[in-house]
Amino acid sequence: MPKDTKKRRKLDGASRTRAPEKFAGAEELYGIENWGKGFFSVSDEGDLLVHPTREAARSINLKGVVDDVSRRGITTPMVIRFPQILASSVRELNDAFVKAINEYEYDGSYRGVFPIKVNQKKVVVREIQEAGRKYGYGLEAGSKPELIAALSADLSPECLITTNGYKDEAFIRMALNGIRMGKKVIMILEKVSELDRILDVAKKRGVKPLIGLRAKLYARGSGKWAKSGGEAAKFGLTTTEILKAVEVLKARRMLDSLVMVHFHIGSQITDIRKIKDAIKESGRVYAKLARSGVEIQYLNLGGGLGVDYDGSKTAFDSSMNYTVQEYANDVVYTVKTICEEEKVPVPTLVTESGRAVTAFHSVLVTNVVDVADRLEQDKTVEMDGDENHVVRELYDVLKGVSAKNVRESYHDALQYKEELFTLFNLGYVSLEDRSKGEILFWNICDKIRRHLKSLKEIPEEFEDLEVMLSDKYVLNFSVFQSIPDSWAIDQLFPILPIHRLRERPAESGTLTDITCDSDGKIEKFIDLRDIKESLPLHNFRRHQPYLIGICLIGAYQDVLGDLHNLLGEAHEVLAIVDENGRTRIQDLLPGETCERVLSYMNWERQEILEGFWRQLRRATEKGKIRETEAKAIAKDLEVTLSHYTYLED
Ligand SMILES: *Cc1c(COP(=O)(O)O)cnc(C)c1O
């Protein structure tokens, strides 16, 4: 008996070591702790959790949400929004300014506005409006429709509504209507020529307008939008024009309408020094105007507050080297210092931060539909001696690859592959030999890659190899619809699986979407020090969902997305976590159907149905198909028109 027990124990021990080891490195591998800002974590089971209120104990399980809504017919891709994150972000920004104002004993206040061009979705604007109510947080609009949306919001009278962009008469009338409705609507001049027109319309209507001047600063931003600032900027008044505007207002005895100095040097300013330079310059513009007797009340610092998408805390394009609190501190301190020097009262501070307020609030979740791995990589070649000489050369290269000659072997392989295709085009190589040559080439690359893994640093010329060999994970979504900035300006977003995170990812891959556009792919990923060329991923098991989350897409992506391939808007899910830490699905907004996206291009339902019918009738008359079959086809069409534009199984 004792013997038996011993054996038993031994077996138990063995099976325990065989159980898959729990991977503890997901947080670091995907940088969650760096970019997540306390909103994201990983559960013990390996699921991605969202903490909309930033409390560790209250979380939403993303996979849980997907499973839950799938029972109600909502499938991936879906945008999951967390309204509470919007509220947290509004609070963070406003509290940062309140704190800085107290700390530096600033004798004025902060009145932020949300620029709705960053995300005009009603749920987003309404949530921000509610969260901002106690701070007197307002809205910014840049066009007629945005102004209409902003004016329809029931904001308290101390909230600002600032308007930027070119204005026609209808725009000006609506802004003045807003003033009549008791709102503080400020029209910011982009061009001096707009002033006369505004004053004329205002006079006709008998309304006193509120006017701001957008200053063209010498200071420039940093990062992708650096050109929005500086002397060559598209918008803004030069010093001469500012003085001209003051003259015009004086002459018309309306100088007291001029209430704001504004600037905007571009979005995602990565370097705090650029912000300081702009504040210094605009602060002086304000102070000099104030000294000359213009009673400016507001200094509006525009947008630009960044988001640390890669979590590296650097001045890199997808990052920022400062915090929201540092931003607020610099604004408050710098303006205060200038006003003291110039002996003028401090202005009310305004910012139009959009990206920082919205970026974190949504995640796109979608499923991997396929992995396009290279079949040739895993195959071997039987040589029969009759092959073309290039194939034999490739075979010899393969046999000879060693740690010492990787570079030489790689160059030889590339050269022979080139030669293989040239000879094929000339008719000297059979299909069988071409296939053998390709297999050998990929075998060589694979072998080289294994040798490279032992090197400390991978030489630059092999970086392409890594990309060539990485698998292509096909995701059920459209880059153009869901993350247009990834395509348009190489913006990086944190991307990671939303489950299996306690399993060490064994593969690495790049991502492609289901559009037929070769640009519909993601081949650059966030990294602390650099940009990664491929993403660590788990092996894909067919018939088992593998879900990927693209995070921090709440700013600009919802609006800039387009209908490439007529892939429409994704389903939307609003998720909140209640007092008890339970997840609640607040709302489901179904994504666009085939019928809807077709109608945008003027393909009306009725016309499509008739088009089908006409052809079906002709075919039945000619006896090509039976009546019942024609009916089935027509029925199928009607059903498909109401379907989601993305893959559903
Ligand atoms: C786009 C824009 C903003 C918002 O900028 P963010 O960088 O998203 O904060 C603010 N003000 C103006 C005038 C803008 O054009």
Image: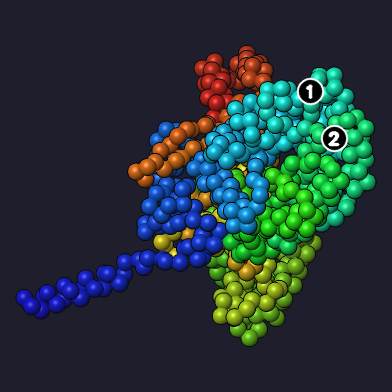
What's under tag 2, amino acid-wise? Leu
What's under tag 1, amino acid-wise? Val
Q: Residues within 10 Å of mark 2 (few under 14, many from 20)?
A: some
Residue 528 against residue 187 in the figure, above or below: below
Q: SS for tag 2? A: helix
Q: Which mark is residue 426?
A: none
In the picture, residue 372 is in which quadrant?
Answer: bottom right
**Residue 264 left/right relative to 120:** right
Q: Which mark is residue 255?
A: 2
- List x then y, in percent, for residue 377: 57, 66
Q: SS for tag 1? A: loop
- List x then y, in percent, for residue 215: 83, 46
Residue 137 against residue 537 in the figure, above or below: above
- Give the residue displayed 72% in from the left and 36% down from the top: 162
Q: Which mark is residue 207?
A: 1
Q: In this rendered view, identify the residue nearer to me: 643 or 342.
A: 342
Q: Residues within 10 Å of mark 1 (few under 14, many from 20)?
A: some
- Give the residue displayed 72% in from the left and 46% down from the top: 347
Quadrant containing the N terminus is: bottom left
